[in-house]
Image (cartoon, rainbow, N blue to C red):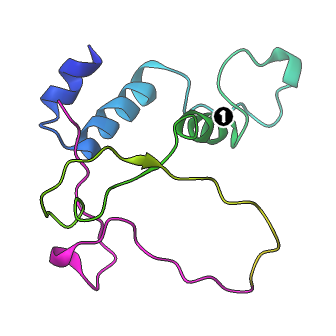
Amino acid sequence: PLMALAQKSGGDLRKLLSAFFSFLDRKTDFYFVPHPDDPPESIKMGFREGDAEKLLLASYRQYPLRRMPKGVSSGKSGSAAAAPIAKKKSGPKKAKEKSTVVGKNEDNKGSNATPAATVAV
């Protein structure tokens, strides 16, 4: 079923994620937050505020980011396997860090737009 959904999305990851979260919204309690006056022991559905996001991030972080081989992201030929990116050691934070958009290419150089992600189907 998930592969069928990926194929139906036409390879566009945004469409796949939109369909997945639409399902969560329509068919589950993923987006429900209990009323603040309800006692915690009586709550049988929904998530405390912020817990659904924590669950989502924990699921995302189960898989490491992988660095693409040089030239692959710019469209040049080459098909080496991507290597996992080592996690950075947490240390003192700098006052200001420059942020960059991951995945910029020549088509959107200088903009904050990210290119369409794709799903391998």
Left or right? Give the position of 76 relative to 39. left
From the top left corner, tell me how far across and down residue 61 is, in percent.
58, 40
Left or right? Give the position of 58 relative to 42. left
Magenta-span inclusion, residue 116: yes
Left or right? Give the position of 46 relative to 18. right
Which is more toward the observer, 53 or 26?
A: 53
The amino acid sitting under disc 1 is Val
Which contiguous range is marked in magenta?
95-121
Q: Residue at x 88, y 24 (%)?
A: 39
Quadrant of the image containing the C terminus = top left
Which is more toward the observer, 77 or 19?
A: 77
Relative to 56, does residue 42 appear above or below in the rendering? Answer: above
Q: Main secondary structure of the magenta part?
A: loop
Which is more toward the observer, 9 or 36?
A: 9
Quadrant of the image containing the N terminus = top left
Left or right? Give the position of 68 relative to 38. left
From the top left corner, tell me how far across and down residue 13 is, in percent.
27, 43
Q: Describe the element under mark 1 as helix, strand or loop.
A: loop
Which is more toward the observer, 100 or 69?
A: 69
Q: Quadrant of residue 120?
A: top left
From the top left corner, tell me how far across and down residue 37 is, in percent.
83, 33
Reading the image, the residue beneath label 1 is 33
Q: Residue at x 49, y 20 (%)?
A: 28
Relative to 43, does residue 7 appear above or below in the rendering? Answer: below
Q: Quadrant of residue 118?
A: top left
Relative to 38, does residue 111 appear above or below in the rendering? Answer: below
Q: Quadrant of residue 68?
A: bottom left
Q: How many marks?
A: 1
Q: Residue at x 74, y 82 (%)?
A: 94
